[in-house]
Image (tube, rainbow, N blue to C red):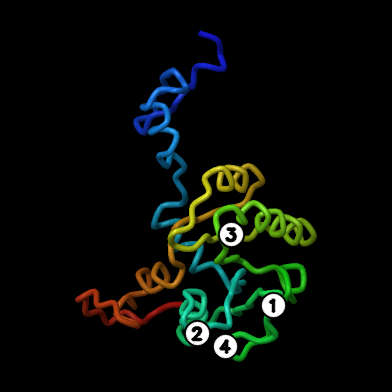
Amino acid sequence: MSSEEVQTTQLSNGLTCDLPASSPLAKLLKSQRTWVGPDAKKRAAILRGAKSIAIVGASPNPSRSSSFVGTYLLQSTDYRVYFVNPNADTILGQKAYPDLASLPEVPDIVDVFRKASDIPAVIEDILAIGALHGQNPTVWVQLGIWNEEAAVYAESQGLTIVMDRCLKVEHARFNGGLNLMGFDTGVISSRRAGR
């Protein structure tokens, strides 16, 4: 077999094997997620350490997911929250910015509400603003959005990336607030909610 016909696949146990690229098993393994982002402890640390969050793809439509997340961040945290949408002037009563380069600061987290194929362009925008200031913000790609190649690229550029996770749900989970807006954890805690 020539090298074009064989695919080296890394299995979840860390071992690799060569498979014919056209085999059903090779196609199945290629479709499965192999990239693993920061674990819960690291995600909690990202959220604790952040002071500012930009929501790229924020929508002025109150029924969109980005609006729920933006409302939660504005009402339940002390993050500086920026909304990025070139087609809006204001979102949730806040100024909307046309792009990341227009923000008054480099945000610590860029929360992305864009389709998977747009993630590489967003990463390039993040690198452009971070390179200007020597900062590397965390790329947080919202629940239901997955682009493994973009994640690998982001990490190769020194960025931290979280994918397919809701920032609002993760923040509430780490701060004992999953009872907010319809989630009930059943946990009673005297711990004060953090940022």
Dots 2 and 3: beta carbons under 8 Å? no
The extreme bottom residue here reads 93
Q: Residues within 10 Å of mark 2 (few under 14, many from 20)?
A: few
Say which of marks 4 and 2 sits in front.
2
Find disc 3 in the rendering and name its residue. 138
Dots 4 and 3: beta carbons under 8 Å? no
Relative depth, front residue between 151 and 157? 151
Name the secondary structure under disc 4.
loop
Q: Is residue 39 left or right of residue 152?
A: left
Q: Residues within 10 Å of mark 4 (few under 14, many from 20)?
A: some
* Mark pair 1, 2: CA separation: 15 Å
Q: Is residue 195 left or right of residue 90?
A: left
Above/below status of 95 relative to 50: below
Find disc 4 in the rendering and name its residue. 92
Q: Residues within 10 Å of mark 3 (few under 14, many from 20)?
A: many
Name the mark on residue 62: 2
- Could you tell me the amino acid type at mark 3? Thr
Name the secondary structure under disc 3.
strand
Q: Earlier in the sequence, mark 4 or mark 2?
A: 2
Whole-percent x, y for residue 188 in the image: 21, 79
Relative depth, front residue between 135 and 96? 96
Above/below status of 39 relative to 31: below
Dots 1 and 2: beta carbons under 8 Å? no
Say which of marks 2 and 3 sits in front.
2
Give me the residue at 56% from left, 78% from top.
79
* Mark pair 3, 1: CA separation: 24 Å
Dots 4 and 2: beta carbons under 8 Å? no
Q: Earlier in the sequence, mark 4 or mark 3?
A: 4
Q: Earlier in the sequence, mark 2 or mark 3?
A: 2
Find disc 1 in the rendering and name its residue. 87
